[in-house]
Amino acid sequence: MADKLKVWFDAESDFLEVRFSDVSGYEKETNNDAVMERVDEQGQVVGFSIMGVSQFRKEKPLEAELASA
C-alpha cells in the first residue's frame, strides 16, 4: 500500500479520483461501468476513478475489482 494517497473530487462533473502513486499510467475498464482503474506500464494498479459518485446510495456500497499484475 502507498504511504500517501491523493484524492480529487470534482463536484461539477461528479468525478472522484484516487491515486496511490504519481507514476505515469493509463486508464482501464473494470467490472463496474462507473469505475476505471489506473495502471502503470507493468500493470500494477496505481489508482482509480469513479464517475457519477452522487448516484450511489449510502445503503449499498459501490463494488468493483481492481486487477493486479
Image: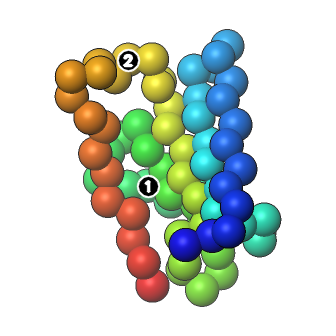
The residue lying at 32 percent from left, 59 percent from top is: 65
The residue lying at 63 percent from left, 70 percent from top is: 2
> Height in image: 9 above or below 47?
above
Q: Quadrant of residue 59?
A: top left
Residue labelled with disc 2? 55
Residue 24 in the image, given as x and y percentages of width and height: 77, 69
Residue type, mark 2 in image: Gln
- Report if the CB atoms under discs 1 and 2 are less than 8 Å apart: no
Q: Distance between the residues labelled 1 and 2?
A: 19 Å
Regarding residue 61, the answer to whether it shows in the image is: yes
Residue type, mark 1 in image: Glu
Residue labelled with disc 1? 29
Check the image and name the residue furthest to the front: 3
> Height in image: 33 above or below 48?
above
Residue situated in front as seen by the camera: 19 or 36: 19
* The C terminus - image quarter: bottom left
**Element at label 1:** strand
> Height in image: 24 above or below 64?
below
**Element at label 2:** helix
